[in-house]
Image (cartoon, grey):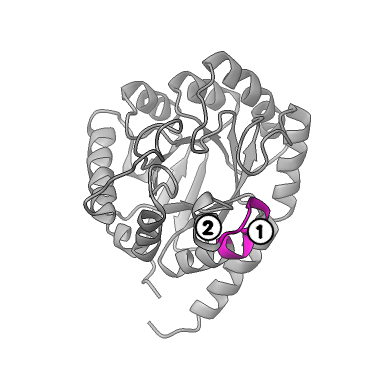
Amino acid sequence: MIPATEMIFRARQFEVAFPRPALVMGIVNVTPDSFSDGGKFLDAAAAAAHALKMVELGADLLDIGGESTRPGAAPISEAEELQRVIPVIQKLAARVSVPLSIDTTKPAVARAALQAGASIVNDAGARIAGEAMWRAVAEFQAGYVCLHSQGTPATMQANPVYADVVLEVGEFFEERLEAMTRRGGIAPEQVALDVGIGFGKTLEHNLQLLAHLQSFGRFQRPLLLGVSRKSFIGHLLGAGVDERLPAALVCASLAVESGVQIIRTHDVAETVQAVRMAEAVLARKKN
């Protein structure tokens, strides 16, 4: 078991002290085309009801997204993304006490979501994020998830290439942490890191990252992992989207052993059970 690291994650009025049991982040896709649940919660009321159910099942955070980041997804306009996510965030901000995250690459959407009650920006465009995104995060003293990607959703799986994916993702985190704190006004305590499973990676790249998650502990920032039902599981096991939960739970449990502090998932109840079971066993191992 990886030794626990003492650190703080701050997101507006929320402060989380680690070490502590891993946080489970429920995914709320307000989209017609997300690979797992696209179209199910495009209506704001349906999305909010789904999110509330996730909180009842044990979600510690909620991640609301209005633009699909599945491989091959086409971008949407800023106006359309705002129309999808802001009503959901407004509904939830008035009814839940858990932090709300906005999953977006657009600074204007991030800012509007923070104004509506979100506390975290989950930035799948962190590779290209400029100071406009960082300024919004800094202004609201929000949390910021720095996700590694290669290319855009429309192109990222065309031919991803790395000499050493673990080394290169680590170098990306090092460069982004330095830039956002020096130029963006974001404190290290506001940042969590996501290796970006499936974001411009082959099956082998994803497996290498999962096998070496502990190496990213050197940054002393919370690690967020999203593997829920992703296509690399299907490529390895020949499983359809609705058949990938067991493999995703194995990945989540191994990630907790490697020191990951936040698990992002479509399946909250099952993930809470798997993670808590893993933690109970790991707590009884001698360091």
Q: Residues within 10 Å of mark 2 (few under 14, many from 20)?
A: many
Residue 101 sits above or below residue 77 on the image = below
From the viewer's perspective, is 68 left or right of 225? right
| Residue 50, label in figure | none
Image position, residue 265 (x, y; %):
59, 51
From the viewer's perspective, is 259 left or right of 112? left
Please state, as top left, top right, bottom left or bottom right, where the N terminus lies in the image. Answer: bottom left
Give the residue displayed 34% in from the left and 41% down from the top: 159
| Residue 243, label in figure | 1
Give the residue displayed 47% in from the left and 18% down from the top: 108
Image position, residue 41 (x, y; %):
72, 34
Q: Is residue 243 magenta?
A: yes
Disc 1 residue type? Glu
Stretch in magenta: 238-248
Report the predominant secondary structure element of the magenta stretch.
helix
Residue 162 sits above or below residue 109 on the image = below
Residue 21 can be seen in this image: no
Element on which disc 1 rests: helix
Please state, as top left, top right, bottom left or bottom right, where the C terminus lies in the image. Answer: bottom left
Residue 19, quarter of picture: bottom left
| Residue 233, label in figure | 2
Q: Is residue 250 magenta?
A: no
Tell whether label 1 touches label 2 (CB within 8 Å): no
Image position, residue 222 (x, y; %):
41, 53
Image position, residue 62 (x, y; %):
61, 43
Disc 2 residue type? Ile
**Comes first in the chain, label 2 or label 1:** 2
Give the residue displayed 77% in from the left and 38% down from the top: 49
